[in-house]
C-alpha cells in the first residue's frame, strides 16, 4: 500500500468529512476556502447539507438484499453508480494533476466526469485521461467565438454532452476569498501579494508542488481570438459580461449536436423553459451555495422540478451530497443521479487521484449499505415512500 493510499485509508479517513480535514491541512487557507466556501453568509451552503438531515428514511425491514443494482443510465451512458463528478473550476490549484486526476478517478470508478470551462488542463488531455464518459461544462466567458472554438474542440475530442451553467450571471460574493486576498494573490502584483503570502509558507509541500507545476496557468480552453488563452484573474470580470440567456440555446443547439443539459435550475418554471429550448436534462443546482445566497437547498427544490419536467428530460441534482445516503434520498425524490463537487474535490486536494478514488469508494459503500438497510434491491424501486419529509415539502 502506498503512503498516500494509507493516508486516506481507515482509521484516518472513514467519511468525506475526514477528507475535508486532510484537505484543510494540506492546502493554504486561500485555496482551501476557495474550495470549501460559499457566497455571503453561506446560508445556502449550510442548507444544502442540512436539507438531507431533515429528510428521514422509512425502511422496509426483514427484507433480504443479497446484491443491489446501482447502475444508472444518464445521457445515454451506463454508469456503475449514480454519482457524477461535478465541474469544479481550476482543480489544478488543489493538485497539479487536477482535472486529469479527477477524470481518471471517475473513469476507474465507472462514472462520468464533467470538465469545467475554467480548467487548468487542456480539454483534450482531460478526455484522454478517462476511460469513462467525459462531459463539458460551458460558460460564455471570452465570448461566443471562444466558446465556439472550445465546443468544436470538445466535440472532436469525444466529449459526449454539454452542460450549460445558467446561475453565474456574475461571480458570487465569496467573503472568505476577499479576506484571504485571493484577488491580490492572482494579480501578479508583488506589492499587493506580500501581505497574503505567509499562508503559503505554512504549507511547503503544497507550495513546492504548485511551483514545480509552473504556478498559475492560463486557461487553455478559453482562447480569445487575437489574444490567446484567458488568464484566471480575468474570469470574474468576464463572467459578468457573458451571462447565458435562454436565447443563446438556439445558437448552442446548432453548435452542439449532442445532448445539452441546463445546470442551475431551481424552479419548475426554469425547468419548463429548459425543455422548451431543447434540453435533454436539467441539474437542480445552486452552484453548491456559491452564487445567490438565500436560495433554497437543492433537495428542497428537487420535487418541484421533477413535477414540472414530468419525464420529458433527465433530472440530476447537486449540492450538499456528502454521504451515500444523501444520494439515495435524492433518487427517492426523483433525481436520476447526483453530481458531487466538494466531496471528490476534498479527496483530490488531500491525495490527488488516490483521494478521488477514496471519496468515490466511500460514497459507493455508503450507498450499498443504505440500500440493504432500507430493504430495497434496485435504484429503480426507490421512491418517496421510503422517506419522511417535513410538512410543507412538495411530494
Ligand atoms: C471550488 C468549486 C468550483 C466550482 N466551479 C464550477 C464551475 O466552474 N462550473 C460550474 O458549473 N460549477 C462549478 N462549481 C459548482 C459545482 O459544479 C457543483 O454545482 C457544486 O459543487 C455542488 O455542490 P457540492 O460541492 O456541495 O457537491 C464549483 C464548485 C466548487 C466547490
Image (tube, rainbow, N blue to C red):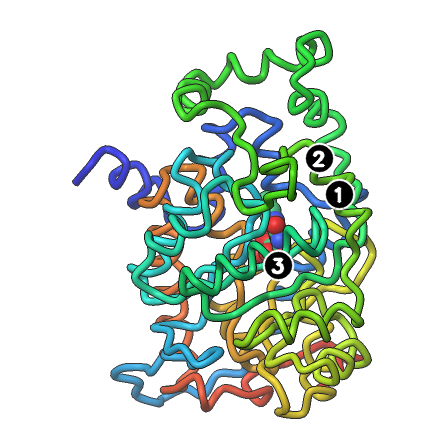
> Is residue 145 positioned above or below 264 on the image?
above
Going from the N terminus, do you reach mark 3 or mark 2 first?
3
Q: CA distance from mark 1 to mark 2?
A: 6 Å
Disc 3 vs disc 1: Cβ atoms closer than 8 Å?
Answer: no
User: In the rendered picture of this protein, how many numbered marks are placed on residues?
Assistant: 3
What residue is shown at x 69% (from left), y 13% (from top)? 189
Q: Which residue is mark 3?
A: 148
Q: Residues within 10 Å of mark 1 (few under 14, many from 20)?
A: some
Q: Which residue is mark 1?
A: 238
Residue 247 coordinates in the image, percent (x, y): 80, 71
Q: Residues within 10 Å of mark 3 (few under 14, many from 20)?
A: some
- Mark in front: 3 vs 1: 3
| Secondary structure at numbered mark 1 | helix
Q: Give the quarter of the figure containing the N terminus.
A: top left
Disc 1 vs disc 2: Cβ atoms closer than 8 Å?
Answer: yes
Q: Nearer the viewer, residue 224 or 175?
A: 224
Amino acid at each position: 500500500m502506498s503512503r498516500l493510499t494509507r493516508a486516506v485509508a481507515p482509521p484516518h479517513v472513514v467519511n468525506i468529512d475526514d477528507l475535508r480535514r486532510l484537505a484543510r491541512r494540506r492546502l493554504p487557507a486561500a485555496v482551501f476556502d476557495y474550495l470549501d466556501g460559499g457566497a455571503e453568509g453561506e446560508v445556502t451552503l449550510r442548507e444544502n447539507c442540512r436539507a438531507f438531515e431533515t429528510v428521514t428514511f422509512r425502511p422496509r425491514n426483514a427484507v433480504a438484499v443479497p446484491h443491489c443494482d446501482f447502475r444508472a443510465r444518464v445521457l445515454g451512458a451506463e454508469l456503475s453508480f449514480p454519482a457524477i463528478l461535478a465541474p469544479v473550476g481550476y482543480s489544478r490549484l488543489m493538485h497539479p494533476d487536477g482535472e486529469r486526476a479527477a477524470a481518471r478517478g471517475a473513469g476507474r470508478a465507472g462514472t462520468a466526469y464533467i470538465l469545467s470551462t475554467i480548467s487548468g488542463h487542456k480539454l483534450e488531455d482531460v478526455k484522454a485521461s478517462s476511460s469513462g464518459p467525459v462531459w463539458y461544462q460551458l460558460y460564455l466567458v471570452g465570448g461566443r467565438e471562444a466558446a465556439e472554438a472550445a465546443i468544436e474542440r470538445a466535440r472532436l475530442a469525444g466529449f459526449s454532452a454539454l452542460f450549460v451553467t445558467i446561475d453565474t450571471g456574475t461571480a458570487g460574493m465569496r467573503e472568505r476569498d476577499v479576506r484571504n486576498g485571493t484577488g491580490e494573490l492572482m494579480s501578479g502584483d508583488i506589492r499587493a501579494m506580500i501581505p497574503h503570502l505567509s499562508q503559503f509558507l505554512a504549507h511547503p509541500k503544497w507550495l513546492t508542488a504548485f511551483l514545480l507545476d509552473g504556478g498559475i496557468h492560463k486557461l487553455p480552453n478559453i482562447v480569445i481570438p487575437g489574444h490567446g488563452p484567458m488568464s484566471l484573474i480575468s474570469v470574474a470580470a468576464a463572467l459578468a459580461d457573458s451571462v447565458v440567456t435562454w436565447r443563446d440555446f438556439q445558437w448552442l443547439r446548432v453548435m452542439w449536436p449532442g445532448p445539452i443539459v441546463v445546470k442551475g435550475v431551481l424552479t419548475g418554471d426554469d425547468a419548463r423553459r429548459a425543455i422548451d429550448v431543447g434540453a435533454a436534462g436539467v441539474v437542480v443546482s445552486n452552484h453548491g451555495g456559491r452564487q445567490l445566497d438565500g436560495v433554497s437547498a437543492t433537495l428542497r427544490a428537487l420535487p418541484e422540478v421533477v413535477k414540472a419536467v414530468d419525464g420529458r428530460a433527465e433530472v440530476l441534482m447537486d449540492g450538499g451530497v456528502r454521504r451515500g445516503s444523501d444520494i439515495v434520498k435524492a433518487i427517492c425524490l426523483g433525481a436520476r443521479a447526483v453530481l458531487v463537487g466538494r466531496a471528490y474535490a476534498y479527496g483530490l486536494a488531500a491525495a490527488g487521484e488516490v483521494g478521488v478514488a477514496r471519496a468515490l469508494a466511500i460514497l459507493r459503500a455508503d450507498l450499498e449499505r443504505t440500500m440493504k438497510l432500507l430493504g430495497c434491491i434496485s435504484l429503480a424501486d426507490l421512491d418517496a415512500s421510503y422517506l419522511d419529509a417535513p410538512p410543507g415539502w412538495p411530494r
